[in-house]
Image: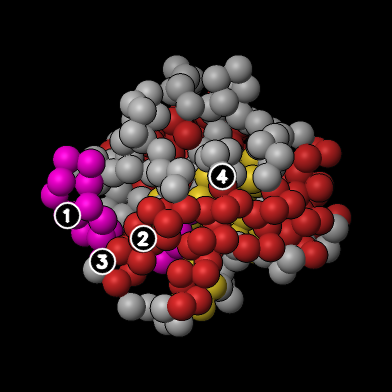
Amino acid sequence: MPGSIDLNSDLGEGAGTDADIMPLISSANIACGGHAGNESTMRAAVELALRNKVAIGAHPGYPDRERFGRVALEMPQRDLVESIRRQIDLLVGIASRLGARVTHVKAHGALYNQAERDPAAARTILFGIQAAKAGQDVVVFAPPGSAMYEEAKATGMAVAREGFVDRAYESDGTLRPRSLGDALITDPSAAAAQALSMLEKGGVTTVDGPFITLQVETLCIHGDTPGAAEIARAVREALARANVKIASPRS
């Protein structure tokens, strides 16, 4: 059991849960204008993070608000790199004006999922991150054993391996597709149990039954999962009972 773990959430996406979740986490992944978010929502999320002493991260996605960035787009690499750079820099600028800095980056939705198995997709995202003002100084959030993890490590970037407490896992280590009814874990006690399983046992039981290894440094609760704040509270309380401190990767 580790002595500390980061607890992160994808916020600034219009789910209406930011104010309830922010006091319970240590890192916020803020939507920065691709799949969701605008300058106003980014400013509000950064201000909320500052008040709660939460690390600020950029959460770039495919520029596709209609489908919330959860469908892969056919884009020339240079255009996608530029989109990712622009999204991150927009948040960096807003954070800087408020006296804060962006400390990590986590890709969103289809972008994140593609980079799990596709080294080329992972490198494209990393090119966008490195082109941004935050550059090499950020921590990249990535699935354990993923192409994104391996590519980021190869470039010398800091990486935090991420596990999901509110999502079911397939036996190959990928997340259960959202199109399936049992993809989400909405019971707070079940989500807390999954969080503890990752820390105590080093992995999770999949939907098909087998146990898989998942070594993680950060745990995610999606801000738009039904009951997200209750899930965050249950996970935080379970970690406290296990004497695990909540702290961002750069704390």
Residue at mark 2: 193
| Measured Cα–Cα span from mark 3 to mark 4 | 26 Å
Residue at mark 4: 227
Image position, residue 118 (x, y; %):
30, 36
Where disc 4 sits, the SS reads loop
Specify how the rendered protein is coloured. Answer: secondary structure
- Which of marks 4 and 1 precedes in the sequence? 1
| Rendered position, 207 above or below 22 | above
Do the numbered discs 1 and 4 sit on residues whose CB atoms are within 8 Å? no
- Which of marks 4 and 2 precedes in the sequence? 2
| Rendered position, 168 above or below 199 | above
Residue 114 appears in the picture as rendered = no
- Which of marks 3 and 2 precedes in the sequence? 2
- Which amino acid, by three-letter code, is at mark 2? Ala
| Measured Cα–Cα span from mark 2 to mark 4 | 16 Å
Magenta span contains residue 77:
no
